[in-house]
Image (cartoon, rainbow, N blue to C red):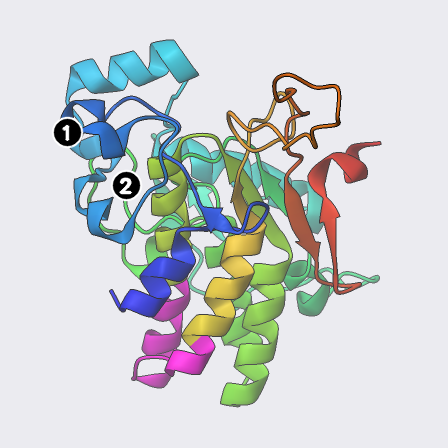
Amino acid sequence: MDGVILNFLLKDRTTNKNIIWATDSYCQLGDQFSANMPILPELVYAIKRRTEKTKDEQKDRTRKRAEVFTPSWLCCEMNNNIDEDWFGQKDVFNSMQDKGWFPNPNKIAFPGKGKDWKQYVQLMWLEITCGEAPYLASRYDTTTGEELPLERRIGVLDRKLRVVNENTFRLSEWLEWAFKAFKSTYGFEFQGDNLFLARENILNTFIDYYSARFGKEPEMKHLIEITDVITWNIWQMDGLKDCVPFSKSEVQLDLFSEAPGEGEPILCKIKDWKNDEVITFHSIKR
């Protein structure tokens, strides 16, 4: 991975520092891997998908952080249920059978009545505690780690990009609507290794669809632009407090203070792309 892109993927937009590990899964490797330490580019080699972790590691993370990875077939079924509600019909992108799915080979048809492909691409989505983001970008089976071909991918972004592929013709038009798909898709995660994998999966999803459509890798400027979107939209957060994990704001000392005070947790910032402004996630829950 290009060094510029890697550094970008590790950026925390709220603190303007790197995301932190926020897990003790790697602490046996040294002090740099402690839960409150930043993830540095030279340390990402240690990050493993859940399917690559031992059963004991998986159980430990489930016990400590309630980390449970949903099988891909169930992710598919749940996304299908949401699409069924929006489209008003079943089996729009695929049909389910015996914990498997069969892709619809035909161009996706839209119901009209104010529901067209452009509106679908811009639907707002949020995956809470997203892990490696299997609901958003299904590059591999969550239980086996086996890579899925494009036609069998079932994530939200996979569906949106399929629709973009089917309804755009020029590169500029494809990029415009692909970016809108990404800008309307959000997710947050506590543990830093999962967050990095989620961001990486989503970036590679963009690369996969671009390469399949145009027969070449995206230009660096487009990779930087989409990574900018990803690092705003897929962020690290303590979902119970809407803040950066383990964070406390700095408190200014006054003349009568003998010791520094403890500040409030730092609320996470996200990007409102429609209005081109930075807001706190907490503010949209009021």
Whole-number angstrom distance, CA of label 1 to CA of label 2? 28 Å
Residue 218 on the magenta segment: yes
Residue ID for mark 2 = 141
Residue 271 on the magenta segment: no
* Mark 1 neighbour density, 10 Å: few (under 14) some (14–19) many (20 or more): few
**Which picture quadrant has residue 7?**
bottom left
Where's the C terminus, which quadrant? Answer: top right
User: Can you see residue 131?
Assistant: yes
Between 257 and 45, the one nearer to me in the picture: 257
- Residue 42 percent coordinates (x, y): 21, 51
Tell me what residue is drawn at x 68 percent, y 25 percent. 264
| Position above or below: 265 against 226 | above
**Which picture quadrant has residue 212?**
bottom left
- Residue 101 percent coordinates (x, y): 37, 43
* Mark 2 neighbour density, 10 Å: few (under 14) some (14–19) many (20 or more): some
Tell me what residue is drawn at x 70 percent, y 47 percent. 86
- Residue 241 percent coordinates (x, y): 64, 23
- Residue 79 percent coordinates (x, y): 54, 40
Say left or right for 123 vs 62.
right
What is the three-letter code of the residue carrying label 2?
Asp
Residue numbers of the magenta segment: 204-222
| Position above or below: 279 against 121 | above
Residue ID for mark 1 = 29
